[in-house]
Amino acid sequence: MSNDSAIGIHDLSFATTEFVLPHTELAEHNGTEIGKYHVGIGQRSMSVPAADEDIVTMAAAAAAPLIARHGADLIRTVVLATESSIDQAKAAGVYVHSLLGLPSATRVVELKQACYGATAALQFAIGLVRRDPAQRVLVIASDVSKYELDSPGEATQGAAAVAMLVGADPALVRIEEPSGLFTADVMDFWRPNYREAALVDGQESIAAYLQAVEGSWKDYGEQGGRPLEEFAALCYHQPFTKMAYKAHRHLLNYCGYDPDKDAVERAIGRTTSYNTVIGNSYTASVYLGLASVLDQADDLTGRPVGFLSYGSGSVAEFFAGTVVPGYREHLRTAAHNEAVDRRRPLGYAEYRELHERSFPTDGGDHPTPSQTTGPFRLAGLSGHKRIYEKR
Ligand code: CAA
């Protein structure tokens, strides 16, 4: 893609929750050897939402710094991708639009395909900007990953939102064509409308993910994509950080390379620093991988980064982006570290209590306890309506 038609990620900001549960705390209470969490799945802690936080408060908190820096004048579309939707009809992005005070001349929509949704949002945003390069699109990925207590998935929970401003002549990453695509109808992870926690077949989900890596990479090659050795780093969807390592070893094998430990570490190591302490943030996770590699890595100017976005069910996409000269001046590394470090540790009993909370469905007034110290809060449910507040 030539520079004059470059479209991509102009700015990126993430937010996470008020609370954090260290895996040491979980292991102490469920009897798991801590090595299984720290080494086996590669997770140190998980973000846990306060009673007055949800995908809307996280999404608004992630996007507010973008609006503060760039204004809202050029934004005519907001696309919010989520697996953990709060309403069957109304798009969560409409609440975010209101909390951020965006102009009424905006289209707002919600996208869903498990952990893949944000990549569809990014690609759709690029299409809109290509049609009118003067416009920018606010893409937000926001998710709370919730599995049953005491289930194998419990240790992989987490929550975060990533907001990206997509536009022409981007300051961070130019997104390239082509994309490699893959869809297969599998029941590896799903959540029927009547359930709060996801259902999952853990081992099948890993196999389905690896099959999707192969399928999307194969199509990427057939569409004329870059050879694997060109990539400075690979941002994989990270349901737990060890999955990125498994996926990359699988891809190296598939391409006929030796999955040498150092080569895998070079490609993946710098992409996991946020996911390992936040946990699974579903559709936000691959873009937390991007935030990590941009924030932590040595200079990546002009280097291609690969993205493998996987959403159970399943849809996957492999694509590339090139890091733009001068990108480091636009990073939000200090704010990102602060979002992670400011979380308050929970005890095991408090975590379980928060996990089991849900709103009564009687249509009454149900205020939430004031817990979050973040910029937005879910004040309660009243007459079946969610009430949000800017603090
Ligand atoms: N020290 C070091 N390593 C240890 C250990 C110890 N003491 N004990 C166990 N391990 C290792 C195991 O050897 C294993 O490693 P390998 O996979 O490399 O063999 C790893 O720890 C995990 O152990 P198990 O497979 O026994 O763990 P489990 O049965 O409890 O389940 C899981 C693991 C399937 C990932 C489960 O956490 C789960 O169901 N998670 C949710 C589903 C999921 O994340 N799937 C990923 C693909 S689907 C997707 O990506 C979409 C999405 O976001 C959900």
Image (spheres, rainbow, N blue to C red):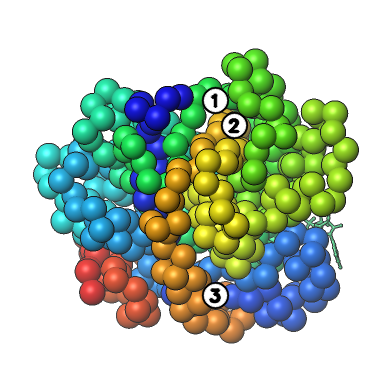
Horizontal side, residue 340 vs residue 59: left or right:
right
Count of numbered tags: 3
What amino acid type should be assigned to the residue bearing mark 2? Answer: Phe
Which quadrant holds residue 390? bottom left
- The residue located at (29%, 71%) in the rendering is 375
What residue is drawn where x is 79% and y is 64%? Answer: 39
- Helix or strand or loop: what does disc 1 sit on? loop
Residue 61: horizontal and vertical position, in percent?
Answer: 33, 63
| Marked residue nearer the N-terminal end (1 or 3) | 3
Q: Are marks 2 and 1 in contact (CB under 8 Å)?
A: yes
Q: Amino acid type of disc 3?
A: Val
Residue 84 visible to an observer of this rendering: no
Screen quadrant of the C terminus = bottom left
Q: Is residue 117 left or right of residue 252?
A: left
Q: CA distance from mark 1 to mark 3?
A: 36 Å
- Quadrant holding ligand 1? bottom right
Q: Give the residue pinned by disc 3.
A: 20
Image mark for residue 179? 1
Q: Residues within 10 Å of mark 3 (few under 14, many from 20)?
A: many
The answer to which quarter of the image holds residue 112 is: top left
Please give left or right for residue 321 compared with residue 23 in the image.
left
Instruction: State the image coordinates of residue 358 (x, y, percent, origin top left).
Output: 43, 65
Disc 3, SS: strand
Residue at image position (55%, 82%) is: 345
Residue for badge 2:
318
The amino acid type, in three-letter code, at marker 1 is Ser
Q: Earlier in the sequence, mark 2 or mark 1?
A: 1
Local crowd size for mark 2, using a 10 Å CA cut-off: few (<14), some (14–19), many (≥20): many
